[in-house]
Image: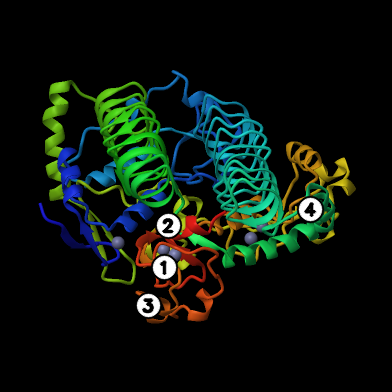
Amino acid sequence: MNAEQKICQNCKSQFTIEPEDFDFYKKISVPPPTFCPECRLQRRLAWRNERGLSKRKCNAPGHTEDIISIYSDPKLTVYDHEYWWSDAWDALAYGKEYDLSKPFFTQFRELLERTPLVNLADSKSTNTSYCNMTVEHKNCYFVSAGWGNEDCAYGNRLAYSKETLDSYTCHKLEAGYENVMCKASYRLFWSLQSESCNDSYFLYDCRGCSNCVGCTGLRNKQYYIFNQPYTKTEYFEKLKELHLESAQGIETLKKKFRELHVQAIHKYAQTLKCTDVSGDNIKEAKNCHWCFDVEGSENSKYCNWGAYGMKDCYDSGPGAGGTSELTYEAVSIGVNNARCSFSTTVWYSHDVHYSYNCHSCQNCFGCVSLRNKSYCILNKQYSKEEYETLLPRIIVHMDAMPYESLIANSEKRIAYRYGEFPPIELSPFRYNDTVAQDFYPLDASRAKAEGFPWYVPEKREYAISLKAASLPDTIAEVGDGILKETVGCAHEGACTHKCTTAFRVVPQELTFYRKFNISLPRLCPNCRHAARLAQRNPMKLWHRRCMCNSTQINADMKNPRGSAQIDPRESARYVNTTVHFHGGSPCPNEFETTYAPERKEIIYCEGCYNAEIV
Ligand SMILES: [Zn+2]
Ligand SMILES: [Zn+2]
Ligand SMILES: [Zn+2]
Ligand SMILES: [Zn+2]
Ligand SMILES: [Zn+2]
C-alpha cells in the first residue's frame, strides 16, 4: 500500500496516511480515518474532563444530596461513587434494541443520557476529595488524571508523587511545588522539564542538580545561581538576597526565569532513552511517532498522556496504557486492555467499541456504564451468536445512515460513519470543561457555531474578605485565620482561565507553605493551572532545521505560516562554547519539533544541544 493524501472532513486540510498506518487499520479491521490527526485529537480531548467540576444533585434513588461531579448537564443521570459501584442497580435495565430508523450515534447519545454515570472517576483511593480520573490516591485534594499520589493537592497529571502541590504532568516528585513536566525530584519548586533535582528553584532542563536557582541546561551541578557557580557559603549568602520566601521575590525571579528560559538553547524535543521516536516528553519508548507525554511504550502513533506497556496503539489518550495493545481512537483507555476503539473510559476490557465508562467487559458495542459484561449492544444482552450476527449489520447501517452534523452559518456538513470517534457535540461534557479547551481553545461564539456544549460561568458573588493584593508578603506573617478568608483572585475574572474570582486556602496547603516557607498564591486554582499549562508546548509538530550556527539559514527560512520571520540577529544571542561535528558551517540536521517556526527560542538538534550542555 502506498501513502495516500486525504482531505480532512473537518478542517479541510490535507493529511497523509502512511503505508504502516494502513497496515494498522487493516489489523484491527477499521476503515482509514476521514479526520486529520489533529482534528481526531481535538475530538478525543473533548470527551475527557479532568478538572471541570460542578455541584449537582445525586440522581440515585432516594438520594437528595449535592455531589461534586464532572457532569453538569442536567439531562445526564449521575450517581455518587459509592452507589454507582454497588450492585443496587443494573445498567442492562437501560438497554434498547438497535433501531434501524436512526443513526447509531443518536442512539448512543440517548443511551448516554439515560444510563447512570459515576460522578467522579476515582478508584481505589482513600481520603480524597475533588479527585477525578485518579487511581490509588491517598489524602489528596483536587488532583486530577493521576496515579498513586499521596498528600498532593491541585495537581493535574501527577504520578507517584508525594506532598506535591500545584504541579502539572510530573512523575515521582516529593515535596514539589509549581513544577511542569518534571520527574524524580525532591524539594523542587517552580521548575520546568527537569529531572533528579533537589532543593532547587526555577530550573529548566536540568538533571542531577541540587541547590541551584534560576538555571537552564545544567547536569549534575551544585550551588549554581543563574548558571554561575558559587561556593556553598556564597550560595547561601546569595540565596538570602533572592528572597525566595517573599511573594515579591518570587515574582521578580519568575520574570528573570522567563527571560533566561527564552534565551537558553532548547533541544528540539524532550526525549530520554528512546529509539526512533517523534513528539515530545517521551521516555523509554521505541518506534513511537507523534506521541506526547508518553513513557515505556512501543510501536504507537498519535498517542498522548500514556504510559507503561502501551503497544501497537494509535490515536489513544489522553489516558492510555497500563498494558494496552491495539487500542485506537480511545480516551482514558487502558489497564490490561486489548482491541478497544472509539471508546472513553474503558478499563480492564477487550474487544469493546463505541462504549463509555465500561469496566471489565469483553465484546461489547455501543454500551454505557457496564461492569463485567460481554456480548452487549446498546446495553442489551445477546448470545455470542446473536452478537456476531448483529454487529456486522450495525456497521453496515452506520455507513448507510451516518450521523450528520451541520455547522451553523456554514456549508460545513460532517458525516460520522463507522470508523469515526463520536462527534464533539455528543460529548457528555461542556467543551471548556474538557482538555480540548487546554489545547484547542475556543470562545463561546465559535463553540456555539460548532454546536459544542459550553460552560457559561455563573455570576460569582463571593463576599471577598481579603484581596490578593492585601495578602502578606511571606507565610511567616500568615495566621490560621487565613483558612476562614475568601481570598480574591488577582485576575478578578478578567481572563480566559475560568477564573473563579475567589478561593480559599485549605489546611493541607497552609501546612505545606509553612513547611517549605512559601508565600501564599495570589491566583485561584484555575488561573494557577492555566499559568502552568502555558509553559508547555502544543501537541503538534513542525519540520524544522537545527538553528546551530545558522544565521544564514534563519534569514532564508520560509516560514510555512507566512507570518513574521525570525530576526537573524535573534539566533546570534547564543554563541557556542565548543566546536561541533559540523565545524564552521551550519548544522544540517532536521527534525520534528513542537516549537513553531515563528517562536523566539533557539532550537538545536540533539548533537548540538548535547555539545553545549555541561
Ligand atoms: Zn482536520
Ligand atoms: Zn482566577
Ligand atoms: Zn486567570
Ligand atoms: Zn545541530
Ligand atoms: Zn552545532
Q: Earlier in the sequence, mark 1 or mark 2?
A: 1
- The residue labelled by disc 2 is 607
**What amino acid type should be assigned to the residue bearing mark 4?**
Leu
Give the numbered dot on residue 583: 1
Q: Which mark is residue 557?
A: 3
Q: Which residue is mark 4?
A: 244
The quadrant in which residue 225 appears is bottom right
Q: Amino acid at mark 2?
A: Gly
Relative to 35, say whether 550 is above or below. Answer: below
- Viewer-side label of 1, 2: 1
The answer to whether residue 467 is seen in the rendering is no
Q: Quote the CA–CA distance across marks 1 and 2.
A: 12 Å
What is the number of the mark on residue 327? none
The tag earlier along the polypeptide, 1 or 3, is 3
Q: Quadrant of the C terminus?
A: bottom right
Q: Nearer the viewer, mark 1 or mark 4?
A: 1
Crowding at label 1, few (<14), some or many (≥20) Cα neighbours within 10 Å? few
Mark 1 vs mark 3, CA separation in Å: 21 Å
SS for dot 1: loop
> Cβ(mark 2) to ligand 4 < 8 Å?
yes
